[in-house]
Image (spheres, rainbow, N blue to C red):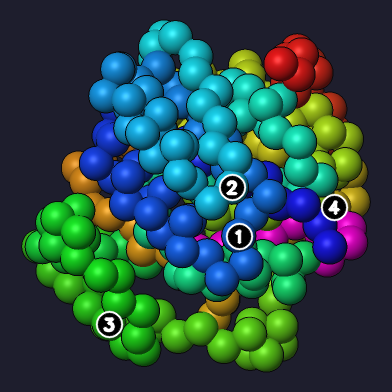
Amino acid sequence: MKRVSLIVTTYNWPEALARCLHSIARQRHPPFEVVVADDGSGPATTALIERMGRDFPVPLRHAWQADAGFRAARVRNLGVAHAAGDHLVFVDGDLILHPRFVADHLQLARPGGWLQGGRLNSSQAEARRLLQGGRPRFSPWMPFASHIPGEQKPKHALRNLPLARLTLGRNPPVMSCNMGIGRDDFERVNGFDEAYEGWGREDDDIAARLAHAGIAALRVRYAALAIHLWHPTRSASDTKDERLPNDALLEEALATRRVRCERGLAGHARP
């Protein structure tokens, strides 16, 4: 059985991280370890990890880097450098995981492919309830936040593993908030490209380089469910603005069909 290292990215939202870690502690199939990849949070996050780590069911590690702006690519690589598992699952620290989240990633993992899961965007009111300790609810056709502010729309939260196997699809929209990959495949492309700083495109870049290496993206539906806690958007106001530096980096990676990045996982020694 694969040893799963669950890499949890976070930045200065310990309340959400606490709910995420509680959901990990309740996994039916626990991961081998959890590494919190911290992009420069303050003392409250450190205190939370130390407190929860005392009786956490698996090793809980803290990989911290100084706050120098949004450096998600680098901190994920740092998290992997602190990890010992042979299978990596990346989640964001504002997700609440279904109790069978880790088990689903293991069941659906395929040689020569990596898994792209989704997320269920909570409404502001539901996020408030969950942050206050409310129990997560995963049931079919729940109301979740729409892309229109203040509106909700029904969205399925059905978990059905046989259906998930049947519907594994290619070329999914890429989101590194719910991503599973073998460590060997991750190392083959040298992990995330740390040239990406500031918002966006680092997940599209690694997906492209994995594709160039012949490692296919597989879209997961009906399994590996996770609720995304509502928060004000932190993304760039116009993600199609050609002036964004990260767009130019991605265009270069696509044009050159690059597989390995220069500034990646290899730059981090294991502690």
Q: Few, some or many C-alpha atoms within 10 Å of disc 2 (few <14, some 14-19, many ≥20)?
A: some
Give the SS element for disc 3. strand
The answer to whether residue 82 of the structure is visible from this angle is yes
Marks 2 and 3, how far apart at CA:
31 Å
Q: Which residue is mark 1?
A: 30
Q: Is residue 187 magenta?
A: no
Magenta range: 110-118
Q: Which residue is mark 4?
A: 215
Q: Can you say which quadrant of the picture contains the N terminus?
A: bottom right
Q: Is residue 86 above or below residue 10?
A: below
Marks 2 and 1, how far apart at CA:
7 Å
Q: Few, some or many C-alpha atoms within 10 Å of disc 4 (few <14, some 14-19, many ≥20)?
A: some
The quadrant where residue 85 appears = top right
Q: Tag 2: residue type?
A: Val
Q: Earlier in the sequence, mark 3 or mark 1?
A: 1
Horizontal relation, residue 9 to residue 236: left or right: right
Q: Can you say which quadrant of the picture contains the C terminus?
A: top right
Q: Which residue is mark 3?
A: 142
Tags 2 and 3 touching, CB below 8 Å: no
Q: Earlier in the sequence, mark 2 or mark 4?
A: 2
Q: Which residue is mark 2?
A: 58
Which residue corresponds to the image point at 51% horizontal and 26% vertical from the top-left?
62
Q: Few, some or many C-alpha atoms within 10 Å of disc 3 (few <14, some 14-19, many ≥20)?
A: some
Give the SS element for disc 1. loop
Horizontal relation, residue 92 to residue 237: left or right: right
Q: Nearer the viewer, mark 2 or mark 3?
A: 2
Tags 2 and 1 touching, CB below 8 Å: yes
Marks 2 and 4, how far apart at CA:
30 Å
